[in-house]
Amino acid sequence: MVHFNKASLVALSVVALSNARPVKRIAQVIADATHDWEQACLAAGGGQQCNPLSQAAFSTLLAAPGPCAQQDAADNMIDLAHQLNNDAEMIRLTQLFRQQPRNAPDSLSTLYCQTAPRNAELNGLFNCQFAGVNPTVFTGNVQVGAAGTIPFGLNAPVNPPGACPASATPVPDGQQLEQLVQSPGTGKQVDTAPPAKSTDAAPPATSPVVNTAPAPSPAVPATAPAADSKPFTLSNGQDAQALNAKFATLTSDSACTDGDQACTDGGFAQCVGGKFVVSGCAGGTQCFALPLVNKAGTSLACTTEGDAEARIAATGATGGITGNGSAAPVSAPAAPVASPAAPVASPAVPESTPAAPAPAPAPSADANAKPFALDNGKDAQALNRKFQGLSTTSSCNLGDNACINGGFAQCVNGSFVVTGCAGGLTCAAVPLVNSRGTSIVCTTQDDALARIAASGAAGGLTGQ
């Protein structure tokens, strides 16, 4: 495994691009980009829906997400604003967030989204660029004028380069657009003509504007879909509630079909020979069905009750872990659900640590409002790196759990026994969201990536 210290990273940062411009990592405190929006959301009555959307949104300002990820997140934020009486402040702040520059670790301009937004309030909006990026070369060494270097709906490069509807000039490196301007702009191109016609540019970013948040679009009613614009989000939460309600009626003696998986007597249960075989969860945790966050479906995990409640509430589903029995019953105990498992018994990731206190109003540097969130994400990455070096022949201690070859592994008699995940799923360590620690789940790779990115940890599953 290759390790970089600060000195080597500094050395890398001065490597020159092919056009002789020095490479300069241009970044920002991404959590600041949605801090004010989250406060406006809470003030409007958004409750537990606010923080998950805020986290998901600011994570799209990293370099890895696709060109349309920021717009998709902004659409989700507008959807929630519609539900909260078309809250004008949430809409204004979302429009500014949509135009916030993205990180540029290669000092190149970032590509523009090439699809239209769902919500009319975002029409014509696109992200500014930081002032320090190369204005003529975009991510992937794409030259200006090529596909992705012109915002959707326009027919010429942005002029001046790096501007956006809210600002007639690029944003100073690392700064937040909402701290520089109040008006989100008109949603029209600053200037699509050749540079010689730059006098057609939009008004300067410093133009005084009072109460300029646009009126809510009549085309999008206040009854727009709930917490997350992904059509499966609420259904996933309700499906998880239905499974948990079903699991509450099961015992280790309940009849089952080989291959069924469930949560029974607080542990993870698999059907073998027509009976459930239960594996207990680590101390302080128990087995729950949880909603996926990046596709339709659910997963099983050993985690804390508070974490399970928070993940379900983030989907917009009400009624706690079981929905108070109001969710539709499922036809089988857990056949469609993957087999995850108990959290790794690692001293670096204590599951029994009490939940952290409520955060201060301003979020921490790169994480979210909960002080342990970033640490949880980094701990999950460290575990996933460790799992890459394990095999079924690796030595272990009774009670150790891990992910090996994409499956959930438990230590039995000094060696790992691996249970494969259901089709299309893989085993991964993911951060808890409501207390200090991690858990191991069988889920999709995209779901695991999304959970880690939402913690503020950069570098994907392993932090590399």
Image (tube, rainbow, N blue to C red):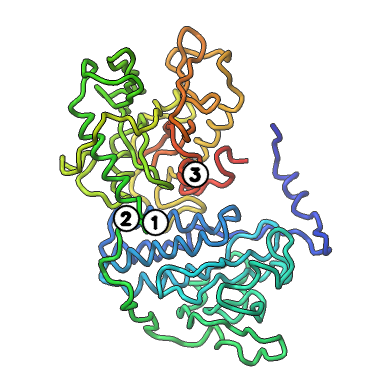
Identity, as a three-letter code, of the amino acid under mark 3: Asp
User: Which element type, helix, strand or loop, lies under badge 3?
Assistant: helix
Q: Quadrant of residue 82?
A: bottom left
Is 426 above or below relative to 64? Answer: above
Furthest residue toward left: 325
Q: Amino acid at mark 1?
A: Leu
Residue topped by disc 3: 446
Taking the spot 42% from the left edge, 61% from the top edge, the residue there is: 35
What residue is at 69 percent from the left and 64 percent from the top? 138
Q: Earlier in the sequence, mark 3 or mark 2?
A: 2
Question: Dot 1, crowdedness within 10 Å: few (<14), some or many (≥20)?
Answer: many
Label at residue 53: 1
In the picture provided, is 274 more to the left or to the right than 327? right
**In the image, what residue occupies the spot 57% across and 57% down?**
66
Q: Where is residue 134 drawn, in percent x and y?
A: 72, 68
The local secondary structure at tag 1 comes to helix
Dot 2 falls on a residue whose secondary structure is helix
Name the front one of labels 3 and 1: 3
Question: Residue 17's spot in the image, x, y percent?
Answer: 80, 59
Cβ atoms under marks 3 and 2 closer than 8 Å: no
- The tag on residue 49 is 2
Q: Nearer the viewer, mark 3 or mark 2?
A: 3
